[in-house]
């Protein structure tokens, strides 16, 4: 008796992506699927003002959704997740091309191991250089280092890279701390019923939160270095001004710190210094005439 086929829900969030969305979708339908699973493709146009929606609405293979206004990354993907029904869920950015036609076969095979909750491939740039590999766990020291003026002084006074953010390219990466969420295959059973991401986050530290959540539930993570995808271009924040992007970075970092390291520790040691540092930076941007909230 043959076992029931699994369904893989491929969730694509797009915003102002008319230049690349068709290639992203092409990469999905170029996948060489085996007989063990089927796919459903759900695309959400997140309030685009260009021709993104029109470019893909004629493709009957796609379940196409549209937002009247632009939602945050987390709210938009959670909306996609609630519309899906797959046993497995692929979070796929609209600027990621599945260059390996056997990626899904390989990734689904990895998730047949009960202990593994998520798998992500290698990501390369258009010039074939490796763009991102799994990150090491975000520590409290790293947040302090990245968001406070004392961390800036520490960087100026030392040439030593004492906070490693990524793994060594030449080493074998087994059960990494954090996987990139621009192309991430997940088990639905490992997730909460109605969401993938915590909506207190907007754009940043989403993968850190998700991978920490999976680990706390007892799942391991897998890095599929035998398969690769191509990151075409970054579109999500290109129309935001420097001040707004920096504020979202800071807000998400503070929430992640409170979630991961506790309210008391974050309020005493990180939040005041990080806010002070942010407003000092805004003051210097104001002097230089760089006060744009949105470009």
Image: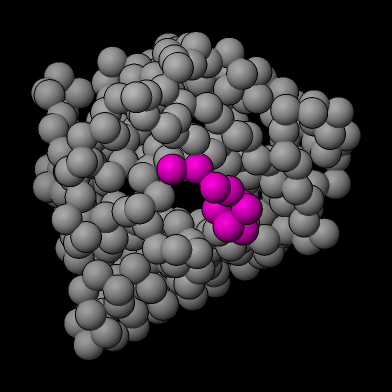
Residue lying farthest to the front in this orientation: 1
Which residues are the magenta region? 79-87
Q: Residue at x 23, y 80 (%)?
A: 262
Please tell me whether residue 149 is drawn above or below residue 64 in the rendered image: below
Give the residue drawn at x 75%, y 41%: 64
Q: Is residue 5 above or below residue 35?
A: below
Residue drawn at x 34%, y 68% as measured from the top left: 256
Given residues 138 and 221, the one toward you in this image is 221
| Pick the front one: 16 or 281 | 16
Q: Is residue 141 left or right of residue 26?
A: left
Could you say which quadrant of the image residue 212 lies in? bottom left
Instruction: Please tell me whether residue 154 belongs to the stretch shown in magenta.
Output: no
The location of residue 26, given as percent across then percent down, is 65, 18
Query: Quadrant of the rendered structure where residue 150 is?
Result: bottom left
**Percent position of residue 249, x then y:** 46, 61
Of 75 and 186, nearer the camera is 186
In the rendered image, which quarter contains the N terminus? top left
User: Residue 283's x, y, as percent?
Assistant: 54, 71
Q: Can residue 168 be seen?
A: yes
At 20% across and 66% down in the image, what residue appears? 140
Q: Is residue 136 visible?
A: no
Q: Is 81 colored magenta in this rendering?
A: yes
Return the x and y of residue 294 as percentages of the image width and height.
72, 59
Which of these two is toward me, 157 or 260? 260
């Amino acid at each position: 008796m043959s076992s029931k086929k699994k369904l893989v829900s491929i969730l694509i969030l797009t915003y102002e992506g008319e230049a690349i969305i068709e290639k992203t979708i092409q990469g999905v339908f170029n996948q060489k699927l085996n007989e063990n699973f089927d796919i459903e493709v759900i695309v959400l146009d997140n309030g685009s003002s260009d021709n993104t929606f029109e470019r893909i609405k004629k493709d009957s293979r796609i379940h196409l959704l549209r937002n009247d206004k632009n939602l945050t990354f987390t709210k938009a993907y959670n909306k996609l997740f609630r519309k899906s029904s797959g046993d497995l869920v692929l979070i796929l950015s609209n600027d990621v091309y599945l260059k390996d036609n056997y990626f899904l076969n390989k990734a689904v095979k990895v998730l047949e191991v009960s202990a593994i909750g998520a798998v992500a491939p290698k990501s390369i740039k258009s010039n074939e250089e490796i763009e991102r590999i799994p990150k090491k766990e975000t520590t409290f020291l790293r947040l302090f280092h990245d968001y406070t003026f004392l961390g800036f002084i520490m960087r100026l006074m030392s040439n030593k890279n004492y906070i490693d953010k990524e793994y060594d390219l030449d080493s074998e990466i087994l059960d990494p701390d954090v996987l990139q969420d621009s192309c991430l295959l997940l088990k639905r059973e490992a997730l909460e019923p109605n969401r993938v991401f915590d909506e207190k986050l907007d754009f940043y530290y989403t993968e850190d939160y998700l991978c920490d959540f999976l680990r706390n539930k007892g799942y391991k993570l897998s890095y599929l270095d035998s398969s690769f995808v191509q990151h075409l271009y970054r579109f999500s924040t290109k129309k935001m001004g420097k001040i707004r992007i920096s504020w979202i970075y800071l807000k998400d970092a503070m929430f992640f710190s409170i979630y991961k390291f506790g309210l008391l520790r974050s309020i005493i040691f990180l939040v005041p210094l990080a806010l002070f540092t942010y407003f000092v930076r805004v003051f210097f941007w104001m002097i230089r005439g760089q006060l744009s909230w949105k470009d």
